[in-house]
Image: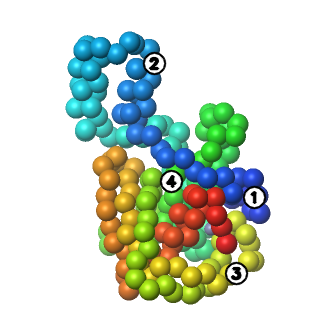
């Protein structure tokens, strides 16, 4: 669903995102609450782990819904959008979450994809951990949440990122280099959003 992008809304945009919990762990924790721990419980948990190694959607439904909304909203303004972070469209109640629940740590961004005509598609990055590497570069940056504002921002030329994807909770490492395109810059901008920082 296309959602409104929060503009100049400090209350949401300054909120720090929280890690997305894989469905597997969320279910295990729910189970722990219900049952006293014991051998049977441990065996059951192991079974759940095995079953969910092959799970199709490893995240809680509201996280997947949010990812779809981020993609729909970005696609609607595809020409002007390089990436979109959860904070920018998050309204907890829209996802059946308690009011005030912080946004989950997820953003979407353009990602190279040779199978589509425009050579890129939206990719969801979940629970990213980043470390800029190499020299810093100063570039002009703007943000959909602060229309008209352009700032010069110093960013790492390259970035190491560990992240999870929509279809797997396995951690994927990647080194994005400046020469590959604007990806390392986008990642650093979107991760700032998740930390409650913005331009
Ligand atoms: Zn932004």
Question: Residue 125, percent across and down?
Answer: 44, 58
Question: Residue 159, percent across and down?
Answer: 41, 73
| Residue 150 image label | 3
Q: Earlier in the sequence, mark 4 or mark 3?
A: 4
- At 48% from the left edge and 37% from the top edge, which residue is drawn? 61
**Position of the C terminus by quadrant:** bottom right
Q: Nearer the viewer, mark 2 or mark 4?
A: 2
Relative depth, front residue between 142 and 123 = 142
Q: Are marks 1 and 4 in contact (CB under 8 Å)?
A: no
Q: Are marks 2 and 4 in contact (CB under 8 Å)?
A: no
Q: Tell me how far mark 4 sits from mark 3, CA to CA.
A: 24 Å
Question: Residue 108, percent across and down?
Answer: 50, 60
Q: Tell me how far mark 2 sits from mark 4, CA to CA.
A: 27 Å
- At 60% from the left edge and 47% from the top edge, which residue is drawn? 103
Identify residue for label 1: 10
Q: How many residues crowd mark 3 within 10 Å: few (<14), some (14–19), many (20+)?
A: few
Relative depth, front residue between 106 and 167 = 106
Direction from residue 95 to residue 122 in the image, left or right:
left
- At 58% from the left edge and 58% from the top edge, which residue is drawn? 195
**Quarter, ligand 1:** bottom right
Q: Earlier in the sequence, mark 2 or mark 4?
A: 2
Q: How many residues crowd mark 4 within 10 Å: few (<14), some (14–19), many (20+)?
A: many
Q: Tell me how far mark 3 sits from mark 2, CA to CA.
A: 49 Å
- At 57% from the left edge and 86% from the top edge, which residue is drawn? 139
Q: Earlier in the sequence, mark 1 or mark 3?
A: 1
Identify residue for label 2: 33
Residue 112 in sight here: no
Q: Tell me how far mark 1 sits from mark 4, CA to CA.
A: 19 Å
Q: Nearer the viewer, mark 1 or mark 3?
A: 1
| Residue 106 image label | 4
């Amino acid at each position: 669903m296309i959602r409104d992008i929060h503009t100049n809304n400090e209350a949401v945009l300054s909120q720090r995102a929280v890690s997305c919990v894989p469905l597997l762990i969320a279910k295990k924790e729910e189970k722990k609450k219900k049952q006293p721990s014991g051998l049977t419980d441990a065996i059951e948990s192991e079974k759940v782990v095995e079953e969910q190694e092959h799970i199709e959607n490893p995240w809680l439904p509201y996280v997947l819904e949010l990812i779809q909304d981020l993609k729909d909203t970005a696609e609607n303004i595809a020409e002007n959008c390089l990436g979109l972070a959860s904070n920018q469209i998050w309204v907890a109640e829209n996802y059946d979450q308690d009011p005030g629940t912080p946004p989950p740590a997820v953003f979407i961004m353009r990602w190279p994809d040779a199978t589509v005509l425009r050579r890129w598609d939206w990719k969801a990055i979940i629970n990213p951990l980043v470390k800029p590497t190499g020299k810093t570069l100063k570039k002009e940056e703007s943000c959909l949440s602060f229309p008209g504002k352009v700032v010069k921002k110093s960013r790492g030329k390259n970035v190491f990122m560990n992240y999870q994807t929509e279809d797997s909770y396995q951690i994927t490492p990647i080194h994005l280099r400046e020469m590959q395109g604007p990806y390392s810059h986008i990642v650093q901008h979107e991760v700032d959003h998740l930390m409650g920082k913005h331009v």
